[in-house]
Amino acid sequence: MACHGTRIGPLQGAFRRMPANICRFADYELDRSAYQLRRKGRPVQLEPIPLDVLFILADRRGQLVTREEILERVWGKGVFLDSDNAINTAVRKIRHALHDDSDSPRFVVTVPAKGYRFVAKVKTAAALDALVGVPSMPEGPAPIVVGREAELARLQSWSDQVLEGRQRRVVFIAGEAGIGKTTFVRAFLDSLGGSAARIGRGQCVEQYGAGEPYMPVLEALMRFCQEAHGRRVVELLHKFAPTWLAQMPSLLSHADRERLQATAQSVSQPRMLREMAQALETVAAETPLVLVLEDLHWSDFSTLELISVLARRTEPARLLILGTYRPTDMLASDHPLRTMKQELELHRYCEELHLQLLSEADVATYLARRFADDDTARPLVAIAPLIHERTDGNPLFMVNVVDYLLEQGSLADASKIEAPRSVLQMIERNLERLNPATQRVLEAASIAGAEFSAAAVAAALERPLSEIEATCARLSRNEQFVAAIGTSAWPDGTVASSFRFLHSLYGDVLYGQVPAGYRVELHRRIAARLEKAHGERAGEIATELAHHNSRANDRNNAIEYLQIAGKRAGARYAMVEAERHYSNALELLGELPETPERDRRELALQLAVGPVLMAVKGWAAPGVERAYTRGRKLCERVGELAQLSSILYGLWVNHLERLELRSSYQIGEELLQRAESVGDSTMLLQAHHALGDTSNRMGRFPLAREHLEATLPLCGARRSRPLGVDMEVVCRSCLSWTLWFLGYPDQALKMSHGAVEVARALSDPFSLTFAEIFLCYLQYHRRDVRALQGTAERVASICAEHGFTYGLAHANLFQGVAMTEQGRAEEGLKLIERAFAEHREAGAEGNRSEFFYWLAEAYCATGRLDEARDTLNSALEVAEEHENLSLEVEIYRLKGEFLLRRGNSTYAQAQACFQGGIEIARRQSAKSLELRATTSLARLLDRQGRRDEARAMLAEIYGWFTEGFDTADLKDANALLNELSE
């Protein structure tokens, strides 16, 4: 495929009005009032019936027109004739008049056994009005498309499904550099003709695009909002996706911008994805949407997440996403696009078109079409093998070689002309034919980026803006290197024309030709101009400024903007991109000489990257430990002890989630010692919580209670969220768990409800989720199945709304547990297994023995005793290996119950399990667990005829309790005591 001809600027043709009854395509005009087809102003002979058919096809451009509809509209109902022959004859005459080829059609495509589709881009008065604004794709003559007929037909078939509202589609268009992906997409968009679809285009940028969350999507949205009727899109974004609108400040007033950006700070990434999905589907319900995202092999991770979300939604939508990429670049960089695309393909959520090199016949067809009005067309076929051999069928190279041969002489003498042997050599020769001033402009443009404002180039060259715009506009009109894409406006009032390189290879070659020292200076000038133009809003382009400053060797400014970019990405919950920015900043910082100021900057970065790494790679990730360990050394080196509590607290969480309970307890002790020495209440609060939570997991319940009760007076004075959850909510929730183990079920329930009330009063969904999850734990231990079911459903609802994956795993777990307890064991087991997988996927290890325990319970309930045994053994191994002993008693008790189901021969083993559990419970002062294990042992002794012994031991532990007599455990114990007393 190829594109050749004189380019018209994107707004140039918008003011040359034409009558509404005239439509234009390629060199032709269809004039309804004159009932005439013209080519370059001259009438083309075409009989009335073929002309009527052509009018019908042009009116329905881009859509399938069935043979039945043509027959009825042209010949009328009830007419008896050889319809197939009549229609075929009419279409054959149309093709003859349009110099169209049925094998490689430019205008009329046959849809076998169904009808025809008119695929040329048609311009009418209405179509020209729609061009006013920022165009979705570069305007210009229709591309000459060869060798892509099958792929284009498949894509048009998929688009028909989209336009008719039957099915959304995500289509990846793959091919190496120069293969013609952009031209193919443009040819397809031209074929849409009058479908009235909104078309938005976003470009991924190699230099810094991978670090800018949602960059191509935001660009496409800007195009939607700036074109005709864009105000409606803004309204829908304001209603359904305000967090996205906050990322496009140029569309908002100052007051709206501040309000929306403040609101967006507390919104999770999953919620942002759902917002955009709903917004796009709402817009598409009014007008079909085509979203073109180019060069996804340079995409940011968050954009891929959005594509995946949109592809997986099952509701029909008039939404078509086209994504282009280079397979070699994707594989070489191990880009996440590969994994995402494979996953979508596995579940048939996407399609792919892989564009191949052109054949010799395709090259001959291209030459014949390009020179259809030239007498040289016939001899051209003879040189097609030569051009194909020279270019290997690479479309970009082929077009450039043909242009070169024409400039050097005639195509007939092609064998005598030494054409360049590679695409890069061809580009270099094309550059050499430009005057030096134009070359300098293009070189500076390559520094500015794949898409650039003429104002940035003017700043780089220190030349007048008008001069740069004139040069780039001339190149665009001649289709040399760049294409106009509208205008750009900067916050300081600068308005300038914008352009993009016709192919990324052009920018690559030009960038490589700029001498290293001069390149540094150009980056510096562009960075300074962008910073000045954006002023207080420079943070909005922090990624771009970081790129230019880094290339300008200004490490200090680059680090500053990378830090800003990381913070902005984190605010969008784009944690992958945030982690990349912080890591790049740390890498640059490592190149600076060691000074106290450098250490302070690194400390700030390590503190910032720690929580981000937790979000991206899990709380237990080794990178998290490295960040906080390094941060600890820096704290001590520069004397920033105020930051030490955050560092130690982060280390504690990391070790806790890795089930390294001894080291996490030691960190808690160090935190407490430092807090007491400096009298810092925040550090003291964190220290007592760390020691209390760790003690809970180690089964040291009296010690846990002591530390956690010490936190409560420290919570109220100052709210803090070091882990994203309000500390009072955390401490009350943990203490409720401790109180239950110690044998105070009523106090535990009251404390847990108190945590929920605090979270609700704060209107903090994350804290509320945390509190409700701990309430689920407590309701499970109290065996209040109905309450557990209701709370788990609330947790699931909150997590689904706000995208809390970790909480959703717990919600699924407890819903599964509740189902199992209510007799729906198979359903419950599936949910528990799913929750376990989600929990592990989220990077959490801290509750592994508990999850094994609940899984074993479900296996028992479904009669899968062998799996129950193996899972219980795994739970016990984890508990003993990591000293995660909070449920050790329950594991022994359940193992004993499991053995009893095997028969009388296991009585001794079961009794040993129950007695072992009781001994552990007494060492832990875990009265609630002791009661359960004693009740199980008493039942066993009763079955063995040892009723008095059973009654005595059960009465002793039951008599200890002073509350909770309405709970299931105490009711069961009381009922068994009554039986034993009869």
Image (cartoon, helix red, strand yellow):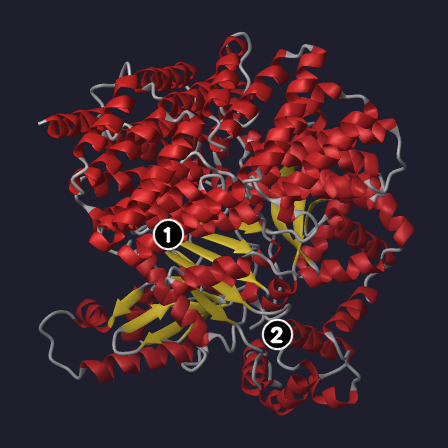
Residue under the point 64% across and 24% down: 669
**What numbered label is drawn on residue 871?**
1
Q: Position of residue 214 (x, y in %)?
A: 55, 43
Quadrant position of the C terminus in the picture: top left
The answer to whether 212 is drawn above or below residue 47 in the figure is above
| Residue type indicated by callout 2 | Pro
Mark 2 or mark 1: name the one nearer the start of the chain: 2
Residue under the point 45% across and 19% down: 729
Q: Residues within 10 Å of mark 1 (few under 14, many from 20)?
A: many
The residue identified by callout 2 is 395
Q: Residues within 10 Å of mark 2 (few under 14, many from 20)?
A: many
Q: Position of residue 466 (x, y in %)?
A: 76, 41
Residue 278 appears in the rendering? no
Quadrant position of the N terminus in the picture: bottom right
Q: Quadrant of residue 329?
A: bottom right
Q: Nearer the viewer, residue 917 or 661?
A: 917
Q: Position of residue 559 (x, y in %)?
A: 77, 36
| Residue type indicated by callout 1 | Thr
Q: Is residue 72 left or right of residue 355?
A: left
